[in-house]
Image (cartoon, rainbow, N blue to C red):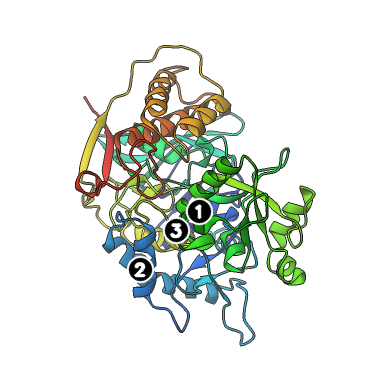
Amino acid sequence: MNVGGDFLVIGSGVAGLRAALSLAEAGDVIVLTKADPRESNTGYAQGGIAAAMGPDDSPELHARDTLAAGDGLCLPEAVNVLVTEGPRYVRELIDWGAAFDRDADGRPALGREAAHSVRRVLHARDATGREIGRLLWSRVSTDKRIRVLDDAQATALLLDGGICVGASYVSTAGVPGTIKAARTLLATGGAGQVYRETTNPAIATGDGIAMAARAGARVADLEFVQFHPTVLSVEGAPRFLLSEALRGEGAQLVNEAGERFVQRYEPAGDLASRDLVSRAIAREAERTGAPIYLTMAHLDADFVRRRFPTIAEACRQAGLDLATDRIPVSPAAHYVMGGVETDLDGRTSVPQLFAAGEVACTGVHGANRLASNSLLEGLVFGARAAAVMPAAVRPAALRATDVVTWSLPAPTGAPLPTAFEVRDLMWKAAGLLRERKGLERAVGQLQEWFAAGPSDLAVDHETRRVRSIITVGLLIARAALRREESRGGHFRADFPSHDDVHWKKHVSDVQQRD
């Protein structure tokens, strides 16, 4: 089926839905999503949404914490936009009826998470993303100016003279189609499924990054992948995220002997930033040869179960009691700081193509995202993109220090690997700990796989899924091999220190065009 509209939004997470609501004021909007509109990384965001709303907080303090977590690579102007505009959009959610938890005085209850200096995280129990997604979807689904095409996967961006004019897609039934639009917004979320171990749902395969890269858009900072330190690690059970809010409420990380250990590696202890805690867990597990645990047994059991019902139920299904048992945990891929490079209004290097949310790289997260800034980013930058999309599009003012070109290899027709083979390679070679030999092997193998398989993108679902994973995996591995230092979510065992002289900069990749 071929359709058209003024605006095309690809994705149905917080960034896409918030943008669609504003765009509906200016024209006909089509939302294209490859799954149920309520299935996205937004719905899996447990901890909450950070905003300077408390009496002891301010945008300046929120900015300071964000910049510190970003390890020297946040763009200050992007951070300023996030922290100053964020409270406005959170209040908007409250006005629309978001069911955030309240304190005894009726004000939004504020939690604390790692690397935040004060309590500033609004939450709806331990399912905040689901609540925000529910609220936004309730408004989008009743807006007659917005058409939703669900169970349809975008396969490629349509270009006319280098300008984006929409996208092609394939329905779940295998029927191809096109959507023509004057402006297109990528809001496709993250790429955690590039890795064998991840907190992300099965749909998070990096499709937006892959499509944009193939269309010649600049992508930046893809070496910076955040690994969440506390993910349920029980054989046979799903890799379920155990929110940072657990530690914010007093949960402790302990080794097999029951000893708290993080402070041996990081002075801030259990509430250090995610990259630091993840590596502390990896080091302690290597030192002891035994599992690492999260425990809340020293806290009031009723409070634990009441505050974290979703996590408690996930633990119960794995045969564990969150309130009384030691819960085995280990890190897993969680969030990609890099993505399609944009300016502060979502413009990309391809005219009339915009991006917002996790698929985008505004520079707001730098080398390591501050906990609970992701939902806020989706709201703020989704709304900002929607504000400029109806107007005449000027070229994006992108800021990456270096731009590196890459080329599409000639197709070989060789068989594609399985998704597990690609994800396993990425976990081992470009995961939490990296070094040259493994990265070189990964880049070489991914380049071979990139050229394999059918050239037609309108093929079966699993082939499209594998192609996206390979494309994004190759871009991540290339960037990780190139950056010969350690910073934020990127840790090179062979270059374990910062190198501000050579590497305190952002690097973009762009496909070389004929």
At label 1, the amino acid type is: Val
Q: Earlier in the sequence, mark 3 or mark 1?
A: 1
* Left/right of residue 106 with respect to residue 119 in the rendered view: right
- Judged from this view, the residue extending furthest toward the top is 413
* Discs 3, 1 touching: Cβ within 8 Å: no
Q: Earlier in the sequence, mark 2 or mark 3?
A: 2
In the image, is residue 188 above or below residue 321? above
* Left/right of residue 383 with respect to residue 195 in the rendered view: left
At label 2, the amino acid type is: Ala
Residue occupying the point 74% across, 63% down: 323
Distance of label 1 from label 2 (alpha carbons): 21 Å
Q: Residues within 10 Å of mark 2 (few under 14, many from 20)?
A: many
- Judged from this view, the residue extending furthest toward the bottom is 105
Percent position of residue 487, x then y: 35, 48
Q: Residues within 10 Å of mark 3 (few under 14, many from 20)?
A: many
Which of these two is toward me, 35 or 399? Answer: 399
Reading the image, the residue beneath label 3 is 378
Give residue 390's mark.
Answer: none
Reading the image, the residue beneath label 2 is 63
In the image, is residue 486 above or below residue 172? below
Reading the image, the residue beneath label 1 is 277
